[in-house]
Amino acid sequence: MKIAPFWPAAALLFVLGAASTFAVDEYYFVAGYIVLQGLIMATAWNILGGFTGYVNFGSAGFFAMGAYTSVVLYTAIDPPVFVAIVAAAVVCGLLGFGAGYLTLRLRGVYFAIATLALAIVLETLMVNWDYVGGATGAFIITPDTEFFPSYNAFMFVLMLALAIGSVGLARYLNYSRIGRGLAAIRDDEVAAECAGVPTLRLKLISTTIMGAMMGVAGALYPYFVTFVEPLSAFNLIVAVNAIAMPMIGGTATWVGPVIGALLLGSVQEWTKVNISSELNLLIVGVLLVGFVALAPQGIVGLAQKFGAWIRAHREKRQGDGRAAA
Amino acid sequence: MLRIRLTCLRAWALAGVLAVSLSAVAAFPGAARAAEPIKIGFSMTLTGGLAGNGKAALVAMEIWRDDINKKGGLLGRPVEFVYYDDATNPANVPGIYTKLLNVDKVDLVVSSYGTNLIAPAMPIIMKKKLVFMTLFGLAVNDRFNYDRFFQIMPSGPEPKTDWSRGFFELAMAQNDKPKSIALLATDSEFSKNAVAGARTNAQKAGLEIVYDKTFKPGTADFSPIVRAIQATKPDLVYVGCYPPGAAGIVRAANELGLEAKMFGGSMVGLQYAALLTKLGPQLNGMVNYDFWAPEPTLNFPGIEEFLEKYQARAAEAGVDPLGHYLPPYAYAYLEILAQAVEAVGSLDDHGKLADYIHDTTFNTVVGPVSFAKNGEWSKSRVLMVQFQDLEENNVEQFHKPGKRVVLYPSEVKSGEFIYPYNKAR
Amino acid sequence: MFSIDLLSNALVAGLLLGGFYAAVALGLSIVFGQLDIVNIAHPAFVILGSYVVYMMNTAYGLDPVLAGLLFTPLFFVLGVVVYRIYYAGFERTGRESLAGLAFFFGVMFIVEVTIILIYGVDYRLVDAAYIGHTLHVGIIDLPYRMLVPFLAAMAMTGGIAFYLSRTFTGRAILAVSQDRLALELMGANPIRIKSLAFGIGLATAAIAGALLIIIGPVEPSFGRVYIGRVFAIVILGGMGSIKGTLLAALLIGVSESMVQTFIGPSWADAVAFSVLLLTLVLRPQGLYGRL
C-alpha cells in the first residue's frame, strides 16, 4: 500500500485542526473531543478485535484505568499532561499484556467473557480504593492554558494528535509482517500455528498495544470532565462504542474504525443535544445489530463490494459492446 | 450475479435500517427552543439513574416558569428554558454547558441534579464568572470555593456533618443513652459522604462504632448484612443508601426483627411515594432525613398551591405523585434567582447578583432561605422525621400530617419522639 | 463475631440465593452450554420478564410466580424468533464468534432501552402475600421472599434436567451439541432442535424474572450486574451440564453470602467475577464440563 500520502495528509489535518480552534466555536471542540476519544478506542479495539479476531468486552476497564492513572498522578505530584499520557500508556499496556497472558490460551468466546469479568473486577477495586476517591470520586482542577483560546481547544488539539498517532500505528500494524501474522491468526489460528506463526507472541503484542492505546484515550478523560468516579469512568457506552464503531465501519483494515467512529460519534453527539441521550443507546444498538447482521464487512466492505459491482458492470457492458460490434 | 444481487438486497436492507434509525431520530421534536427573550439554560438528568428526580425537578421548574410568565415575566420579559438531557453521565455535562453558553447564548444558568452532575460544570461556570444556582449536590463547593455558587439543598454550612447532626442530637438527648452504633453505606458518593459525617458525629458523641461497612448497589439480598449488624448488638443503626438498598434493608430488618434503639439515617428513597406506599408499616419507628413533610410547622406560604399544581401534572409526567422531596426546592431556587435579578435590575452584572444573594434572606415556598459564605444554607434544615402509625398500601395518608413527624430541628418540631425504635412498631 | 448463628444463617441465605441464581443461569446453560451460542443478552431478557410480571402484578394483582408461568409461552416464541434471526444471519454463514457476540450485545441494548422508554428508570417492586414474612426454623431464618424463589428455581431446574435426559426432544438437544451430523442421520432436524432449545432457554428467563422481582426491586440496567454472575456460573459448572450449573450457582451464592457477612458487602460482586477469572485461567472446563 502507498505509504506516501498518509503522513503528509495527517500532518495537514493536524495543522488545520489546530488552526481551526481559533476560528470555530468552542462547543464543536467539546463534541469533537468526544468523537476523537471514540476514534482512538475504536482503533485500539480493532487491533485485537478486527485484526486478530479476539473480542474484547472490557474496553471500559482499560479506558478507566488510563483515567485513574491520571488521577493517581494528579493526586500525588500534579505532573504535566504529557507525563500522564505516557504513564497511562505504560500502565494499561502492562494491563493488556497481563490480561492477555492469563486468558489468551482460551477460545475466543471465553476470552471475551474474561475481559468483561476483568473490567468488573477493576471497577470493584477502584470503588474500594480511597486514594482515588473510591465511590465518591475525585476532582481534577483544570490548569490555565496560555497558547490556545480555551481549555477545550487545547484538549481537542491534544486528542487530535493522539488520534492521528493511533491511526498511524494501526495502519503500520495492518500492513506490516505483524499485521499479516495477526490476520493469519484471525482466519485460522490452528493453521497459523502449524505454519509457524508465533501466535502467542503476536496476540500479546496485540493486547498490549490495544491496552496502551485505550489507556491513552482514558488518560485525558479526567482533565476533560474534571470529576472522575467509577460509575461513569467504567461506563458501558464506552465499551459498546468501542465495539460498534469498528463493526459498523469495517474491521478488516485501519480505515473502518475511523469511518465508524466519525459517523457514529457524530450521530451520537447530535442526538444528545437535539433529542435525548437514552435514544442514543437505542440507535447504537439498532445500528450495531443491523450492520452485524446485514453488512458484516462494515461500510468499508460495502464500499468495496459496490466498487467491485461497478467494475463488473462496466466490464460486462464493454463485453456486450464488443460482442455486438 | 446472484451474489451481487444478494449484496444489493443486503445493502437495501441496511439502508432501510439506517433510514428507520434516522427517521426515528428526526421524528422526535427537538428539546431546544429558539430565540425568546430571557433564556435560562441547564442540563438535567432526564434519563439514566437519577431520572426520577430529574424529571420531577423539571416539572417543578416548568411550573415556576409558567407562574412567572403569568405575572408578566422577569424584568418584564418572558422566561424560556433551554435544556438538554445529560443522561446522568458526568461526561456529557461540559459539552452541554459549553453549548448553552457559547451557541445557545443563554442569559442565566442553573445546574443539573446531583453532585456528580454539578461538579463537571463548575470549571466552565467559574471561567465565565456566572452565578450558579445548584440543585442538590453535597459539598460540591468544598473543592472549588467559588463565591458565586449557591446550593438549595438545606444541608447547612458544613454539609457532611450537618446532615446527620439531628439524628445524633436526638439520640444523645434520650435518658436511655445509646452507647454503640452500626454504620452502613452504599458504595456511592452521597451515601459515603453522609455516613462519613455520621462517623465524625458518632466519635464526637463518644459512641463505639461496632460495625462500619459499605455495600455495592447491585446487592440483591440484605439478610446477611442485617444479620451481621444484628450480631454486633448496636444501639443505633445509621444507614446511608439509595432506593433499592433502602427497600431491601427495611424489608430485611423487618423479616429478621432488628433490635435497636434508633434505626434510619440518610436513606434516600424513603421520601418517595413508591417506596412509602409499598413499605408502609414496615417503616414505623424509623428516623430518617427528609426535606419537607405535610406537617403544620412546615406550612410555608405558597407551598400548598405549588403542591397542588405539581400533583396535577405529576401523573402525566410519570414522576413521584407526592412531590414533597425535590420539587419544592427546584421551584424555590428559581424563585430566589428571579427575586435577585429583579432586585438588581439587570442580567449582566453577575457580581452584583451574587452579592445580593449572599446578603439577603429570601421568602420561598420552602420557607426563609439565606446563604452562608460558601453558598450553602446558613443554617442546616435537614429534617429528622419519624414514621408513625403508617398503614398498609395507602398513599393518601402521606398527604396528611402525623405520619412523618418532624423531630428536628426544634423550630419545626411537630410531634413526640417514640424511643426506642421497637416501641413504635 | 464469628458465631454459629451467623455462620449457619449466612450459609442458608447463600444456598437460597444460589438456588435463585441457578434459575437465572439455567437458560444460559442451555443456550451457551449446549448450543454454544453466547447469548449475552440473557440477563436483559430476565429483566424483561421482571417487568412483564410487574405489570401483571400491578394491574391484576396476579401472583408473581404465576404471572411468570403465564408468560413462558410468549417468551418461548420470542426465543425461537431470536434464534431464527441469529441462525439466518450468523450460524449459517459460519461467523458465530465475533459477529454473533456483537449481535447479542446489540440485542441486549435494544431490550434495555426499550424497557427504559416504556417504564422509565425507576425501581419497581411487586407485592405478594408472603413477601415480608419469615419462616423460623430453630436459629435459622428463612424469609419467604427468598424461600419461594428458591423452591421455584429448584422445581424449574429439576424439570429441565428431567426433560433433557428423559424425553426424545430433550435428548436431541443434548445430542445436537455433541454430534450434529449423527443427529441428522438419526432423523432429527438440528435447526428445529436448536430453535426449541433456545426457546426453552428464553422461557426460563420469564420465570427467572418473576423470581428476581420477588427478591428485590428491579430497574432496567439491573441485568448488567448479572451478566458476569451468570457466565461465571455456567462456566464454573462446566459447559453442557445442568447439574454443574446448579452446583456452581449454589457455590457462588454461598461465597457471596459469606463475603457479604464476614468481609463486607462491597466485595460481594467481585466474588462471582473473580471466580470466573480463576476458573477460566485454571480449569476452563469447569466442574463437570467437557471442553
Image (cartoon, coloured by chain):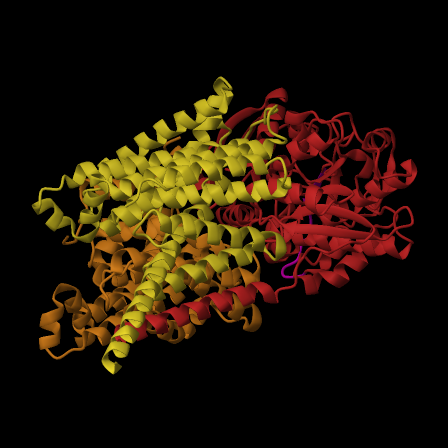
Chain colours: A yellow, B red, C orange
Does residue B384 belong to the magenta stretch? Answer: yes
Q: Is residue C155 visible?
A: no
> Is B346 left or right of B91, judged from the image as shown?
right
Q: Residue at x 28, y 38 (%)?
A: A207
Residue B318 higher or lower than A163, as above or below: below
Q: Residue at x 60, y 29 (%)?
A: A148
Q: Residue at x 17, y 64 (%)?
A: C177
Residue B303 higher or lower than C78, as above or below: above
In the picture, residue B314 is in which quadrant?
bottom right
Residue range in magenta is B383-394
Q: Position of residue A295 (x, y in %)?
A: 35, 63
Q: Is residue A1 visible?
A: yes
Which of the two residues, C72 or A217, is positioned nearer the viewer here? A217
Q: Give the residue furthest to the top.
A: A77
In the picture, residue B112 is in which quadrant?
top right
Q: Position of residue C195 (x, y in %)?
A: 27, 73
Q: Position of residue C168 (x, y in %)?
A: 17, 76
Q: Position of residue C105 (x, y in %)?
A: 38, 57
Which of the two residues, C121 or A89, is positioned nearer the viewer here? A89
Does residue B341 belong to the magenta stretch? Answer: no
The number of numbered discs placed on residues in the rendered structure image is 0
